Image (tube, rainbow, N blue to C red):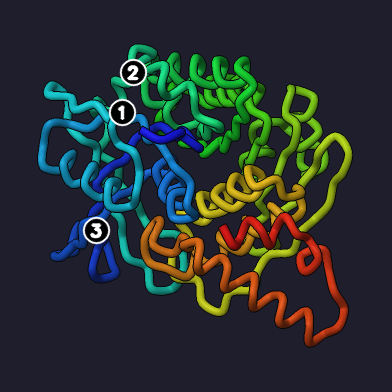
Amino acid sequence: MSEIDILSFGETMAMFVAEQSGDLAFVDQFHRRIAGADSNVAIGLSRLGFNVAWLSRVGADSLGRFVIETLHREGLDCSHVEVDSAHPTGFQLKSRNDDGSDPTVEYFRRGSAASHLSPQSITPTLLGARHLHATGIPPALSASAREMSHELMTRMRTAGRSVSFDPNLRPSLWASEREMITEINRFAALAHWVLPGLSEGRLLTGFDDPADIAAFYLDQGAEAVAIKLGPQGAYYRTHLDQGFVAGVPVETVVDTVGAGDGFAVGMISALLEHQSFPEAVRRANWIGSRAVQSRGDMEGLPTRSELSAELEAVNREQARSHKGSELESDPVWERACSR
């Protein structure tokens, strides 16, 4: 196997998306897809040309085979996905909302194969990855998955690899809110780049202002923090810099699920290409804006050629305005998008 650029891990579920709007109890037809915040990010990074290894477990069932085949088609290295004959593949039902509001999602994942991930799932090959992306979902699945998450993040950071962390709060999976806050902040302290949403950051830190939320995580050991502000954009802070990057206007919001995953794809890909933090946030905002314009959790994530086309469009607009900007003159950005 070629060198692993990025290791991601977690649970990929089968997802049944309603073909018509209304109460899920009365929907007759569904379309089958896959779902999972961690694998959404993995797919997005793979589409941008990174070699991404996926660590997970699925059941020895038709849904598990569907998940693995779909991830294979997206270019993920699934050689580290274990097939569990004793536990099923998780799945979810998702409503269709034509007004752009958040859909209803019902989960069927308790006791799933992925909840039985454990430190024994970690192999030396995986620890050779350049970067680890983690979220707060695997630690919520079970005690063994939590132990695996902690060991992976600790070993990767100790080895000098970069680590990103998106809290991705799932309160229903935790025994209590107090436990969730304590554990999520413990994991965030192991990451170099922390990527919470504003409401998540407020709950986890007790601070209201994005600057204070970011400072909390910088004090815990993070090197940089980007806080998602929804349509308004994002606030970022490092030990040397801070600022606000406006969001990308969207004419029609189709589906908000997956926007945060798109943001993570933009941040991670740009930072691994040695872009500045403000430039990474700009890319993250743009990919997040694409995500909300597509029905499905990861259908809007761009390919490398689509990212390059966006750069060219931005450069043309800048040339017309004769103003210039960091984006136009930054050779690192241009090299990254021609990759």
Location of residue 90 in the rendering, given as x and y in whole percent from the top left corner? 24, 37
Q: Circle 2 sits in a helix, a strand or a loop, which is it?
A: helix
Give the image quarter of residue 314: bottom right
Q: Which mark is residue 80?
A: 1
Q: Are marks 1 and 2 in contact (CB under 8 Å)?
A: yes
Task: Name the residue rendered at 36%, 61% in the picture.
Answer: 296
Taking depth in this image into account, of 31 and 304 the one nearest to the observer is 304
Q: CA distance from mark 1 to mark 2?
A: 8 Å
Q: Which residue is mark 2?
A: 121
Location of residue 71 in the rendering, given as x and y in whole percent from the top left corner? 30, 46
- Please, is residue 256 above or below residue 126 in the view? below
Mark 1 or mark 2: whose residue is earlier in sequence: 1
Left or right: 276 in relation to 199? right
Left or right: 60 in relation to 318? left
Q: CA distance from mark 3 to mark 1?
A: 34 Å
Taking depth in this image into account, of 80 and 112 the one nearest to the observer is 80
Q: Circle 3 sits in a helix, a strand or a loop, which is it?
A: helix
Q: Which residue is mark 3?
A: 24
Tell me the crowding category of disc 1: few under 14, some 14 to 19, or many 20 or more residues within 10 angstroms, Cα based: some
Mark 2 or mark 3: whose residue is earlier in sequence: 3
Task: Name the residue rendered at 60%, 30% in the picture.
Answer: 163
Taking depth in this image into account, of 27 and 126 the one nearest to the observer is 126
Quadrant into which the N terminus falls: top left
Tell me the crowding category of disc 2: few under 14, some 14 to 19, or many 20 or more residues within 10 angstroms, Cα based: some
Quadrant into which the C terminus falls: bottom right
Location of residue 192 in the rendering, given as x and y in whole percent from the top left corner? 68, 30
Q: Circle 1 sits in a helix, a strand or a loop, which is it?
A: strand
